[in-house]
Image: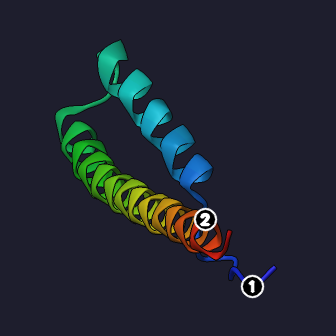
Amino acid sequence: MSKTKSTKSFEDKLKRLEQISEMLESGEVQLEESISLFEEGIKLSKECLTILENAELKITQLKKEVSNKSTDEGEDE
């Protein structure tokens, strides 16, 4: 794989977000740790959103390419 060990996948980030959510919802973490976890969660949330937006853009581009190829092939007939 071309990913480095420091680069987490979307799934890893989402799993960590779920862990953070569970920890915060439990009410068992101290205020300072809660703030730190919340900040980490916000950062991960933004990273996941960026990944999803990029995936959506790529899918839109691929659909457009397929549509253009279908149109071009239809003109040859």
Residue name at image x 37 percent, y 28 percent: 21
The disc at residue 2 is 1
Q: How is the image coloured?
A: rainbow
Q: Residues within 10 Å of mark 2 (few under 14, many from 20)?
A: few
Left or right: 69 in relation to 3: left
Q: Residues within 10 Å of mark 1 (few under 14, many from 20)?
A: few
Residue name at image x 43 percent, y 40 percent: 17
On the image, the x and y values in percent for residue 51 come to 43, 61
Q: Residue furthest right?
A: 1
Left or right: 30 in relation to 52: left
Identify which amino acid the numbered label 2 is placed on: Gly
Height in image: 66 above or below 11?
Answer: below
Residue in front for this viewpoint, 26 or 76: 76
Left or right: 3 in relation to 6: right
On the image, the x and y values in percent for residue 3 come to 69, 80
Residue name at image x 60 percent, y 47 percent: 11
Residue in front for this viewpoint, 2 or 13: 2
Dot 1: element: loop
On the image, the x and y values in percent for residue 72 come to 57, 74
Calculate the distance from the C-alpha at mark 1 to the C-alpha at mark 2.
39 Å
Q: Quarter of the image for the C terminus: give it.
A: bottom right
Left or right: 27 in relation to 56: left
Identify which amino acid the numbered label 1 is placed on: Ser
Q: Which residue is mark 2?
A: 74
Precedes in sequence: disc 1 or disc 2? 1
On the image, the x and y values in percent for residue 36 come to 25, 50
Q: Quadrant of residue 54?
A: bottom left
